[in-house]
Image (cartoon, rainbow, N blue to C red):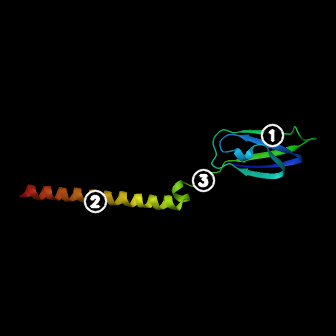
Amino acid sequence: MKGEGTVEGNGIYLTVYGYNTKNLEKSYLGGRYTFVIDPADDLYTFIFDNTEGRGEILVQFTLEETWTRPLAISSPHSLVASLIGLSLFLTGSIILALARIRRTRNLRVSRSL
């Protein structure tokens, strides 16, 4: 999840409660700011605190959900392991299919004798 915003005025404190938000406790925001929560969860609470400031403050705030790539593509080790697993699966399937074909041929030959 990606958050972006603009603070016009003195500045404001932002605290975010939820999964993976340790770095967003009482963060002072002034001007333009961005933050990223990765990996993100489904439920968050955003608290804007102006108790220490004076005057009016305008806060514009947007959240954007971002999707990451699947695990096999994002990690080279996982990609290699996935390719090895797929190769082993395909090899085993071919061996089983050939064994079945051979067994079927042997049964036909033995019946014809």
Q: Position of residue 71 (x, y in %)?
A: 53, 54
Residue denoted by label 3? 68
Left or right: 109 in relation to 12: left
Instruction: Identify which amino acid the numbered label 1 is placed on.
Output: Phe
Residue denoted by label 1? 48
Q: Position of residue 62 (x, y in %)?
A: 75, 46
- Give the spatial CA distance, label 2 vs label 1: 64 Å
Q: Nearer the viewer, residue 9 or 105?
A: 9
* Contact? badges 2 and 1 (CB < 8 Å): no
Instruction: Identify which amino acid the numbered label 3 is placed on.
Output: Thr
Neighbor class of circle 1 (other Cα within 10 Å; few <14, some 14-19, many 20+) is some
The quadrant where residue 91 appears: bottom left
Mark toward the viewer: 2 or 1: 1
Q: Residue at x 41, y 61 (%)?
A: 84
Q: Residue at x 68, y 40 (%)?
A: 18
* Contact? badges 2 and 3 (CB < 8 Å): no
Q: Nearer the viewer, residue 87 or 14?
A: 14
Which circle's residue, 2 or 1, is located before the other in the chain? 1
Neighbor class of circle 2 (other Cα within 10 Å; few <14, some 14-19, many 20+) is few
Residue denoted by label 2? 95
Considering the image in quadrants, where does the C terminus appear? bottom left
Mark toward the viewer: 1 or 3: 1
Which circle's residue, 2 or 3, is located before the other in the chain? 3
Which circle's residue, 1 or 3, is located before the other in the chain? 1
